[in-house]
Amino acid sequence: MRLTLHTDYSIRALLYLAHNPGKRIAIQEIADTHRISQHHLVKVIHRLSTSQIVLARRGRNGGIELAREPRQIIIGDIVRLMEADLAAIVACIPDTGQQCILADACRLRGLFSRSMNAFMGVLDRLTLHDILHDDKKN
């Protein structure tokens, strides 16, 4: 499975903000630190802001900061938010609206569905705080 750069950038930005609690951070600072596209990061931050995961303020004293405590930010929710077409990653998962020409003979359909549910189940048990904690160990 391959997740988009928007998911990667969103998690990087959230980690950066969590490492700087109570401080408004410029998008450019995050982009420079992680050597990522500011243009793409702006799109990511906009989506996180409209979903009330980050607070974004424009202007001279502007910047972004977490809208919630890291323990309240569930990684599975972030992945679902950023991966607009998550169910279509594997076309033969039921209810994706895509037809598989091998559906009658293939036994992978149920396996892929269970695998995706297991993958998301792991992410649903992780919070931003959990990642911060693991990050300090490494």
Image (tube, rainbow, N blue to C red):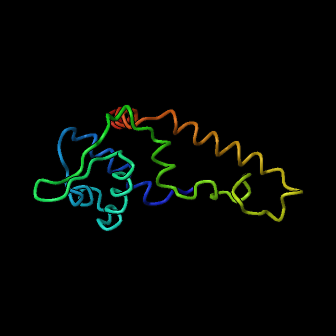
Q: Is residue 47 left or right of 89 when viewed as pictured?
A: left
Q: Is residue 20 left or right of 110 when viewed as pictured?
A: left
Which quadrant holds residue 36? bottom left
**At x 63% / y 39%, what residue is drawn?**
118
Viewer-side residue, 29 vs 137: 29
| 72 over 83 or under it: above or below | above
**At x 31% / y 34%, what residue is drawn?**
69
Q: Is residue 50 left or right of 81 when viewed as pictured?
A: left
**At x 78% / y 51%, what residue is drawn?**
108
Horizontal and vertical percent for residue 27? 24, 58
Pick out the residue farthest to the right.
Answer: 105
| 8 over 39 or under it: above or below | above
Horizontal and vertical percent for residue 62? 16, 54
Pick out the residue farthest to the left.
Answer: 60
**At x 19% / y 53%, what residue is drawn?**
63
Classify the position of the N terminus by image quarter.
bottom right
Horizontal and vertical percent for residue 59? 14, 59
Which quadrant holds residue 2? bottom right
Classify the position of the C terminus by image quarter.
top left
Viewer-side residue, 76 vs 57: 57
Which quadrant holds residue 89? bottom right
Horizontal and vertical percent for residue 132? 34, 36
